[in-house]
Image (cartoon, rainbow, N blue to C red):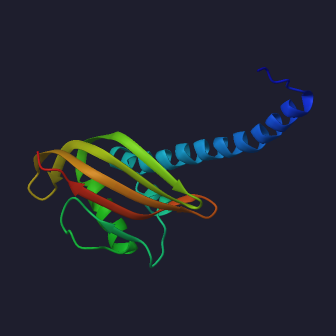
Amino acid sequence: MSRVINNNDFSMVFQKLKRVVPQARLILSDREEILEIIKIFFDTGKTKNLAPLAAIQLDDTRFSSYSDIPPFDLKDYATTVALQELRFVSISDYEYKIINPKIDLFENSAVVTFQLKQTGMIVDNYSFRGQHLSMLSRATFVMIKSTKWKIVHVHLSKISE
């Protein structure tokens, strides 16, 4: 049994595609923007430019974080940014690799999960000694979007090697 397709059928299909394709492009650009923010976060350890840390995270009482290095307690925005800055300036030859990132979008929020490989040299400026860092961690970033995507929660946990 054959079906005859008329111009009206094509018109309906194209109208539907016009609605679907822009939404797909929006999701793709959101995913790219989110991944870029995660890279900016970790690039701080390479560039030592600390300004982006405050710009990409939400300065709000609802912000929270857990770290893969001490202190392990739940931290607020100000404490988190201060500890992140200290961490990134204390590591020389810093390198990182984001492994298997997964980005789940929910309207104006996103959950990003991945494994994180970090290497470098932790420098003690008082004794001028260094300790090699090589760490594999699980990472979860929760982000929200108002005008731009911002990090609202970070959870890093070290994987025993």
Asked whether, in this view, residue 140 is left or right of residue 119, the answer is right
Q: Dividing the picture into quarters, in which one does residue 95 lie? A: top left
Q: Residue furthest front?
A: 1
Q: Dividing the picture into quarters, in which one does residue 79 lie? A: bottom left
In the image, residue 8 above or below residue 109: above
Asked whether, in this view, residue 3 is left or right of residue 128, the answer is right
Whole-percent x, y for residue 127 in the image? 8, 56
In the image, residue 15 above or below residue 50: above
Q: Which residue is at 53% across, 54% downward?
A: 105
Specify the quadrant that holds the N terminus: top right
Q: Which residue is at 81% across, 34% downward?
A: 14
Q: Report if residue 48 is visible in the image.
A: no
Whole-percent x, y for residue 113 in the image? 37, 51
Asked whether, in this view, residue 86 is left or right of residue 128, the answer is right
Q: Residue furthest right?
A: 7
Q: Report if residue 132 is visible in the image.
A: yes
In the image, residue 142 above or below residue 63: above
Q: How many marks?
A: 0
Q: Which residue is at 22% across, 58% downward?
A: 68
Q: Which residue is at 54% across, 43% downward?
A: 32
Specify the quadrant that holds the C terminus: top left
In the image, residue 11 above or below residue 122: above
Whole-percent x, y for residue 2 in the image? 79, 20
Whole-percent x, y for residue 59 in the image? 48, 72
Could you say which is closer to the camera, residue 116 or residue 43? 116
Could you say which is closer to the camera, residue 129 or residue 120? 120
Q: Dividing the picture into quarters, in which one does residue 21 lie? A: top right
